[in-house]
Image: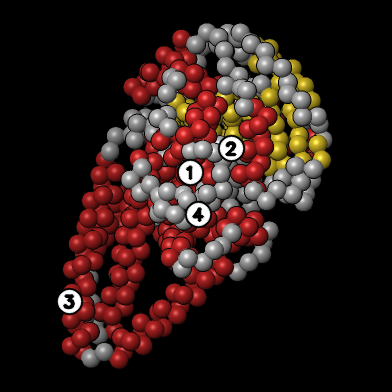
Amino acid sequence: MTELLPLTRSPRTMRLVEVAPQEPLTDAPGFADDFEAVLDDTSVHRSTIGCVIPAYNEEESIAQVIESLLSQTRVPDVIHVVVNNTSDATVRLASQYAGAHEITTELGEQFTEVFVHDIGKNPDKKVGALNYGYTLVEGYDYLLGVDGDTVADTKAVEYLEAEATSDTRIGGISAIYSIDDRPIKGGIAKFLITGQRAQFAAFNMHNLLRGRNMAVLGGQFSIFSTQALRDVMKENHQSTPWVKDSEVEDSLLSLQIKSAGYLTKISPFARADVGGMTTLRALDAQQVKWTYGAIELMWPGQRGDTKGQPFHPNLRVRWLENFGMLTNLFVRVAFIALLAGSLSIGAFVFSPWWLLPPLVAIALNTRMAMTMGNRNARDILFAVTLAPAEVYMWLRLSYFARSWTRFLSRKKVDNWAMQAKAERGAGLGHWTPLIVVVASVVAMAVIWSMLGPMVQSTILWIGWPIVGVVTVLQTLSMFFKLIRRQHGYKV
């Protein structure tokens, strides 16, 4: 293990800094009144913040990440870049920022120090890097976790700290996440990033409308109370805040913070752009890892003695997501199968009512796109034209099916390693859904041709009403989301 800088901690100094008047980020004063009151009442900074950046092969983004932290109106008191298992120039590029920094912001003179640690081979991957960083900042009031490819708006830390210090019940607060699509090149990459932006927007809005209760304090850019982390460690008999019991370490920690009696929140103001997946291979690996990890949290005993918590408040969102994806999968597959069967025997009769679900979906997608704080023409077209959103939904359905298939098969797979492999451009697992679909279509066509006319008619007579009822319920759900008040939130 090689240390590029000594592991001495910078002194914890109490800094009294006047807070400048805040400009509201939205024209809807209703939801912002309480939060603005917190900002107005805050006259001094009495907390200390230690920032931890776990970095693995982040040479393309690490410089921009550090610069964004040094450009904050509220600069973290110390920044530790923990480089692990890297094979690129992350250490060299990050080391250019190592050392003390005196920074003048609108909040006054501030001081921070950047340390870069190359911990070499790390079998625990990101979990190990985060825990290493925790040991360096456990004496601070707050731990700010930042991914090595996440760039935050200049006031993000200020907003997170202001709300965290306003309520001792808060164990962690997450920023609103999106993806900066301006540097993205290539048609497929732009399409995938636009789909991920829409996915993030829907997830963020759902959490904002649930009383700003955040189901997952994403490691991309979240602030944690170190007291809450200590309580989690004590309550769960852990020696570290993050453990390897889940492939979605941030989801598990969020559950534990909530179980320890703390609040997990999402900020309505702090924003951060995360790194997106620009290839089908990488997106497949990431989404399968996320979904698989979430499924593991719902079932007991998946890894050692980890207890499943299917009714945990933070997992209700996961259940809704999985039920929604299952419904989407059933409706689409059943509709296409019944349509093909009806056409094959000349029994299909078009009804204008079938146009209603797509129209409601377009309206809902468009409204969601309009709530995006950094929306562009591509986001609007993605929603209005429906076809791109539908293609992206089919991709998500394939990841959903692969995750459940992998989980139910009980096959032990290192999804972290598979994601890293996919991001390097290796692996062919993302073609599996397509192969399965082609094989299923061929099998269904052969079986259908072997059935007699009476059986075929019976299947259609039973199938269409079932699909119709499910589609009506799904359309009503979309309609209620469409007319629900959003209180001026921007995602």
| Residue occupying image coordinates x 74% and y 17% | 102
How crowded pointer 4 is (Cα within 10 Å; few <14, some 14-19, many 20+) is rated as some
Q: Nearer the viewer, mark 4 or mark 3?
A: 4
Task: Using the image as rendered, state which of residue 233 and residue 399 is in the foreground.
Answer: 233
* Disc 1 target residue: 251
- Element marked by disc 4: loop
Q: Which residue type carries mark 1?
A: Ser
Q: Which residue type carries mark 2?
A: Thr
- Element marked by disc 2: loop
The image quadrant that residue 112 belongs to is top right
- In the image: residue 170, left or right of residue 364: right
Q: Which residue type carries mark 4?
A: Arg
Q: CA distance from mark 1 to mark 2?
A: 15 Å
Q: CA distance from mark 4 to mark 1?
A: 15 Å
| Residue occupying image coordinates x 49% and y 22% | 164
Number of the label disc, if any, that sits on residue 240 = 2
Number of the label disc, if any, that sits on residue 303 = 4
Percent coordinates x, y for residue 70 in the rendering: 68, 26
Image vertical order of residue 290 relative to residue 45, above or below: below
Number of the label disc, if any, that sits on residue 461 = 3
Image vertical order of residue 434 relative to residue 232, above or below: below
| Residue occupying image coordinates x 76% and y 34% | 116
Task: Using the image as rendered, state which of residue 491 and residue 165 is in the foreground.
Answer: 165
| Residue occupying image coordinates x 76% and y 25% | 8
Q: Earlier in the sequence, mark 4 or mark 2?
A: 2
Is the C terminus in the top left, top right, bottom left or bottom right quadrant?
top left
